Amino acid sequence: MTRVRDGRTGRWFVRGFIACGLIALGAIGSLVLLHGKETFSPSLPSPVAAPTSAQPFPTTEPAAVEVANDAEVEVMLAPESVAQAGIKTVEVSVVEPRASTEVPGVVTANAYREVKVTPLAGGIVRKVHAELGTAVRQGAPLATLFSAELADAQTKYLSMRAMLEADHRRRERTRKLVDIGAASRQELEEVTAVHAGHATEVEAARQRLLLLGLSRKQVDALTHPRQVTADVMVPAPIDGVITGRSANLGQVVGMGEELFVVTNLSDVWVVGDLYEQDFQRVRVGSEATITTPAYPELRLQGRVSYIDPRVDPQTRTAKVRVEVPNPDGQLRLGMYMTMVFSTASGAPVVVVPRAAVQTIGGRQVVFVAVPDEDGRFVQRTVTLGALAGGSYTVLQGLQSGEVVVTEGSFFLRAESLRNAPSG
């Protein structure tokens, strides 16, 4: 009996051990299956790689959107929805790429509108009519000189004129005598020759007075020694501003000595230093934009009018000149300026405004308006180049003449994500 109980007990022990093992294996298998479902679920897409620094816009959409938007997506809006979204469009354009070269510059006077004023006769300065910075009109008196040279020239003119009148009377008398036979033809010819010589001397004296500053009216009115004057008026040769003065009261000056500088500042030159490496980009006729720290909002447009053919051996630069208008006199001589030259840098390219570009799943897209179908837009993937002046260069995806959405493109982006196919 005891043996029988010991045998039954052994068999029950073996059976219990096998049952525990089977339960443990079942639990381990269940855990493995659950973990496999969570890790290798075929219903979820693979994760999207993080955006790189080469992408112009950050990627913010989930991976499912990137897969769903591989196909072209159309967005249809009712007219009232288009108005509410504030959608605006612009036609894609083709522009010529431009390169900019910036150099410092200084305002200088237009040398062709700057005149050095000199007296036509030497003398002593009796009066100065203009000061530095004074605006003058052409012909206005700048200074008055006392000139003995002018007085002598007037006296000589009167003397020559008196001799000419005497010769004229003598010639007439001789002609009458010849007519009645009281004088020979030779005497008449001699008197006529003397008369012609004196006429030439009178005209030379008259021109001398005009050169010394007297007007034709003053010369014609000069008939008596009491009218002789020694005052020489130095007039302004052009309209402008007195930018230089060396005349002072009592100063003795000679003919041709500089007394004033009159400059017309209605337009000025901006002169800068152009480096050798920029010679091939900046040429005569290149467009230039001129700015100055003195007037931050002032932008002047001009073109290069001159580039010095000589290169400075010390700085390895050549002078470049741009003529700009200065009607209000804002630009003063010596002011610092910044000169930016714009030159063509390649073949024409398609550009699109920055506001038209949206990012979906790591791709840059634009929304193209379908021609003759109001409210219908097509999402188009584009390849972009550099950003310049608020516009992107389009390397692929758009053509000139197509119409893209600018303002309101974010609203269309949201609609395209909502309507994008999920499979």
Image: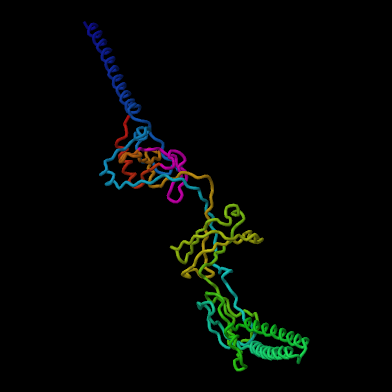
Which quadrant of the figure has residue 361? top left
Q: How is the image coloured?
A: rainbow
Q: Which residue is more in the foreground, 303 or 71?
A: 303
Say if 42 sits above or below 342 in the image.
above
Horizontally, residue 193 falls left or right of residue 355, namely right
Rendered location of residue 295, percent (x, y): 45, 65
Horizontally, residue 43 falls left or right of residue 249, namely left
Main structural element of the magenta stretch: helix, strand or loop? strand
Task: Residue at 65% x, 79% y: name it.
Answer: 256
Q: Which residue is more in the foreground, 163 or 140?
A: 163
Q: Which residue is more in the foreground, 331 or 210?
A: 210
Task: Residue at 26% x, 10% y: name it.
Answer: 11
Q: Is residue 79 magenta?
A: no
Task: Residue at 32% x, 34% y: name it.
Answer: 420
Which residue is most to the front? 180
Which quadrant of the figure has residue 315? bottom right
User: Which stretch did the figure color magenta?
Assistant: 378-401
Say if 251 sits above or below 411 in the image.
below
Rendered location of residue 78, percent (x, y): 26, 41
Which quadrant of the figure has residue 257? bottom right
